[in-house]
Image (cartoon, helix red, strand yellow):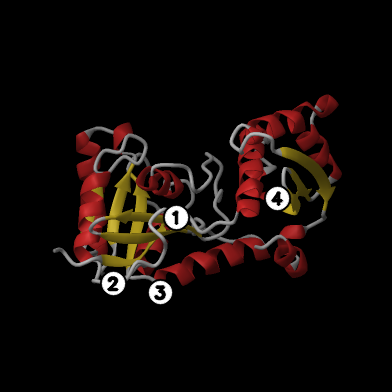
Amino acid sequence: MTEFKSGFVSIIGRPNVGKSTLLNAIIGQKVSIVSDKPSTTRNQVRGILTEKRGQIVFVDTPGIHKPRSLLGQRLNDSANHAISEVDLVLAMVDASQDIGRGDSFVLERAPAASIVVVNKTDLVAGSEILACLTKLAKFDKSSYYPISAQTGDGVKELLDELFGRLPHGPMYYPPETLTDISDADWVAELVREQLLIVAREELPHSIACKVTEWEWPRIRCEIHVERSSQKAIVIGKGGLVLKEVGTQVRRQLPEGAFLELFVKVNPRWQSKAHSLERLGL
């Protein structure tokens, strides 16, 4: 009988390389929200894959970037912490973009044993993937895997590599557990995901969501913005934006959920320690 393997694997990279999309593809359902806006992931999100051969606890991290606020610094600290506290690191880059300073910053900090994941191969030709791999070779990591998190191409081979390299170990979570995010935090993330879809370019970083009351089926979620003008955008003319957000979130919740959304102006919350702590950031 094959011995059970287990371990923790962090997924790191600059914003928008597809970390959350890969995690969701591996787990088989959405456990981390996805958006085309940079720095969508703000907290470490654990997705748990359990098979007969073992269990992998994946840690989806905030995109590593040049911080412009206390929030930005905390996001970077969270991602950097995840590098040193796991068994393996997946350092992800975007095959459809040039390998830039942001990628170099991430790869230079990743351990030598890291696996470099070249994502979005479905968007480029084979010659471009080869050129990307050639550029990445200078970082001298243990292995390189071209994949498409969107289509699933190459994901099975990546998982085989991970299980092959993880140590024998215990089952950390019950086999039916897919994530360790709480129900309240998940609802807050779903609200933020929908707001990112409709928000203007200047809004994504200024939005934070927090469930403040949970008495099923009633859920109260606060949406924090930094200026009154942003509050007006989030609410929308006649409340249409907020209504649409609520409708889309409820579709992803158990039947009967009653979701109340409130928008609050919290000036410069991204730079206030007490505001970040209240918001769980």
Residue bearing the label numbered 1: 177
Instruction: Tell me where residue 258 appears, x and y as whole percent.
Output: 74, 38
Residue bearing the label numbered 3: 84
22 displayed left or right of 198: left
> Which quadrant, please, contains the N terminus?
bottom left
Residue bearing the label numbered 4: 209
How many angstroms separate mark 4 from mark 2 (CA)?
A: 37 Å
Image marks 3 and 4: residues in contact by CB distance under 8 Å = no
Which of these two is toward me, 193 or 216?
A: 216
Please indicate, yes or no, whether residue 98 appears anywhere in the rendered image.
no
Give the crowd class for mark 1: few <14, some 14-19, many >=20 residues within 10 Å: few
Instruction: Tell me where residue 201 appears, x and y as whole percent.
Output: 65, 38
193 displayed left or right of 86: right
What residue occupies the far left of the structure in this picture?
A: 1
How many angstroms separate mark 3 from mark 4 (CA)?
A: 29 Å
Marked residue nearer the N-terminal end (4 or 2):
2
Q: Give amino acid for label 2.
A: Gly
Instruction: Tell me where residue 153 appears, x and y as whole percent.
Output: 26, 38
232 displayed left or right of 112: right
Residue bearing the label numbered 2: 169
